[in-house]
Image (cartoon, rainbow, N blue to C red):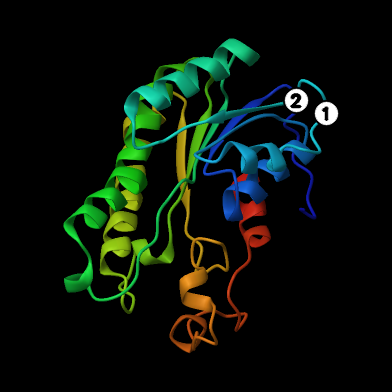
Amino acid sequence: MTANHYEFTGKTVLVTGAGSGIGQAIAQGFLENGARVVVAGRRANRLTETIAEARPGQALAVPTDVADRSSVDTLVARTISEFGSLDVVVSNAALYASGPLSALSEEEWHRLFQVNVDGLYHLVAASGDELVRTKGNLVAVSSVSGSFGDWGQAAYNSTKHAVTGLIRSLALDYGERGVRFNAVAPAFTVTDMTEGVWQDGADLTPFTNRIALGRPGTPADVVGPVLF
């Protein structure tokens, strides 16, 4: 999964949106580097697939809806109860929507923010004190869409701008308490979430013409930066 080895033996890592795509790759990268990993997502069967190669007692799957504060509180409590601590939180769960903003329903707009932005807030609120205790860190998966505009995805871009801004502020608020907050910002990445864009012979030139490698990203591309 990664060329570099990062020593996470004895560390507990929580990854949301870990049933597929970027979250699945990140969770497996931490497992390969010795961490105890809790995977969270809405599809229990996909979470089980993510941790199928884990050693006995190394991983735990907890079905979770990050948009629901009580669900996230339960997730963090189970993590600490199972492994005794929480050192790293990876906030990756997200929804994606594309198309004209005028065609997006109000329900879809609010659901994007509930998962992409409220989900991050819920994780910080639930895990912040524990991360202070362990001097841990939180990594959010944002997007280059959180820094610039993009074609046909105004709602999604808005949520990623919020994620990036929130992480910048949290880094200042928690830094003096020994907790690091960072975000990684992938460019367009081929995952189940974005298949509506890259399937059916879609022209990806508007995305790839701003990527130095000249191709869409893959989930594996994101693992190394998160481990770092």
Image point (35%, 45%), residue name: 115
How far from the left and from the top, in percent, is residue 102?
Answer: 16, 72
Can the viewer see residue 25 in this picture? yes
How far from the left and from the top, in percent, is residue 51?
Answer: 72, 37
The disc at residue 127 is none
User: For the residue labelled by badge 1, is the local secondary structure a helix, a strand or a loop?
Assistant: loop
* Residue 197 horizontal side relative to residue 61, left or right: left
Q: Which residue is mark 1?
A: 55
**Amino acid bearing label 2:** Gln
Instruction: Judge whether 68 appears above or below 77 on screen.
Output: below
* Residue 144 horizontal side relative to residue 226, left or right: left
Neighbour tally class for label 1: few under 14, some 14-19, many 20 plus, Cα within 10 Å: few
**Label 2 close to label 1 by CB (< 8 Å):** yes
Instruction: Judge whether 12 appears above or below 194 on screen.
Output: above
Give the quadrant of residue 48.
top right
**Amino acid bearing label 1:** Arg
Residue nearest the observer in this picture, 94 or 157: 94
User: For the residue labelled by badge 2, is the local secondary structure a helix, a strand or a loop?
Assistant: loop
How far from the left and from the top, in percent, is residue 209?
Answer: 49, 87
Q: Which residue is mark 2?
A: 58
Instruction: Judge whether 213 appears above or below 31 on screen.
Output: below
Can the viewer see residue 228 in this picture? no
